[in-house]
Structure formats: structure tokens, C-alpha cells
Image (cartoon, helix red, strand yellow):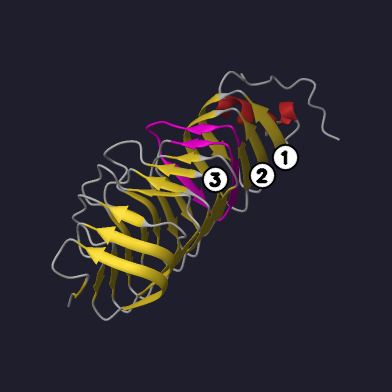
Amino acid sequence: MTDTSSQTAPPRDTLQAEIAYQTSPAGGKMTTFIIRDKTGTCNIPAYTNARLINCTLQSLVVSNASILYLNTCTLEGTGTYNVTNSAVLAESIKVNAPVTFTNSKVEFSSDCKIGQNITLRSTSYLKSNGNTWQGKNSKASIAITALDGSRVESIKDAWSQWSDYFWKATTNSIIKVTNPVKIDHTGDTGGGLSLIDDSSVMVLSHPLAISLTGNTNPVFTATKNSRIELYNTPSVISDSIIFQLDTSKGIIRNVTSLKSNKEEIGRAHV
């Protein structure tokens, strides 16, 4: 056993300082730890299992097979927020900064408030159940962007105040949204729901009527052999066209009515 009695403990006043202490000889070179009530940058070392409670993260780097648990934390700062080859499990957190996940898994389990863009790359997976996706400012243009074979599963979430689209998928990605409790584009200049490109799929099953006013974007846009699936919706009413497709497909089942205030409901765009 290594004698650490003579080691000088580093300061522990910030979040990163506490992480440095936990992983230092003075802290026992811990690879599993819990930190509460700290603020600052956050760089999680490789192969680490960390739980943060009531912390404010001014930046975030997680990489190389680490697992990060966030509870009642806030992501808010001017730094970058990147998670690579790792997993994040979040409960009751606030996301006020853009976050990119690469080859990673993220789960927003309950009562999270996501106010800035989430980007998924390289076969990442996101699951969200019972959370609020409400854009915070003009930079919040698209809630979720899924790329490179990534997957999104949303259940009983609330969606509002994203200026362009709620969901974007490209390069063989899939977004599935089931039973959202709210879809509200009031005051959003673009006002489209989904932009799907390059052999990707969007599935929306929504038990309530969808009404979009003042929107200039199509409700659903699909290009390059992609597919839009709309199920179990009483009606869709839009100031813009509802479907814009090129070589892509739209599947509509158990939808009572579609109404556009344009001259057509759909448009083939080549």
C-alpha cells in the first residue's frame, strides 16, 4: 500500500479542484466518487464513475468509457460541453449550454429542462422521458440534431420555443417521438417540427392536435431517401405546407385531418 500521509492535498474550492483531489494520491486515486454543491469546469478522467449532485458545470469533458451521473445540476457557461465514448445519466438537471455526444449514451430520466441544442454524433443514443425541451434564446434553433447513425427516443416530453425545428436527423439516423405532452411553436419564426435528410427516419405518434401558426418552414421536411411517419394524431393545422419531400416518403396512419393555409398540403421538392 502506498503511503500518502505526506502528500499535500490540492485545494478543493471548485468542482474541478474537487475532481482533482478525488483522483489524486491524497484523495486515494478514486475512480468512483460523489461530489456535491460545487461550481466550475468539469473534466472527468477516463474510466471514471462520477456522481455530481447540485453542481454547476461551466464546461464539460467526459471521455474514454466514463459514466457520469448528474442530479439537480446545471450546465451553464461559455465553455465547451463534449461527451465522447461514455455515458451520462441525468435527473432534474438544467441544460443551458449546447452539448455534443459522440459515440455515447445519454438518458434524461425525469424533470430535466433542456434549453440549448443537443447534438448526437457517431451512433450515439439519447432517451428522454417526461422532460421539458424549451429553447432559452435566439441560439436555440434546433432542439436535437442526430447524425451518423444516431438514435433518439422521446416519450411524454414537452417541446416549445425552438426557432427552426424541434428535431433534425441526417446520415442514417432515427428520431422517434411518442406521446409528447406539448408541441408549441408560438412565436418561433421557422416553426417546423422536423428536418430529416440522407436516409434518416422521423416517427411521431401524437394523441393531441397539432396547430402551428406563423411558421415559414414546412412542418415536416424529408430529403435524400428519408422517411416521415405520422401516427395517431387528430389533426395537423399549419400556416405553411405540411410535407415537403423529394425522393423521400411520408407515411400517415390514424390521422383525421391535415390542413394548410397554403395552397397545398404537401410539395415535392427536387
Q: Which residues are magenta?
A: 71-95
Q: Is residue 45 located in the magenta-colored stretch of the structure?
A: no
Q: Is residue 75 located in the magenta-colored stretch of the structure?
A: yes
What's the distance in space between the residues labelled 1 and 2, CA to CA? Answer: 6 Å
Say which quarter of the image contains residue 133.
top left
Q: Nearer the viewer, residue 94 or 121?
A: 94
Residue 54: percent from the left, percent from the top? 60, 27
Residue occupied by mark 1: 32
Question: Residue lying furthest right in this view?
Answer: 1
* Residue occupying the point 68% across, 20% down: 9
**Residue 201 visible in the displayed image:** no
Residue occupied by mark 3: 62
Q: Earlier in the sequence, mark 1 or mark 3?
A: 1
Q: In the rendered structure, which amino acid carries the disc numbered 2?
A: Thr
Q: Nearer the viewer, residue 246 or 148?
A: 246
Determine whether, in the image, residue 77 is placed left or right of residue 19: left
Q: Quadrant of the N terminus?
A: top right
Q: Nearer the viewer, residue 18 or 185?
A: 185
Residue 263: percent from the left, percent from the top? 13, 68
Give the total of numbered labels.
Answer: 3
Q: Which mark is residue 48?
A: 2
Q: In the rendered structure, which amino acid carries the disc numbered 3?
A: Val
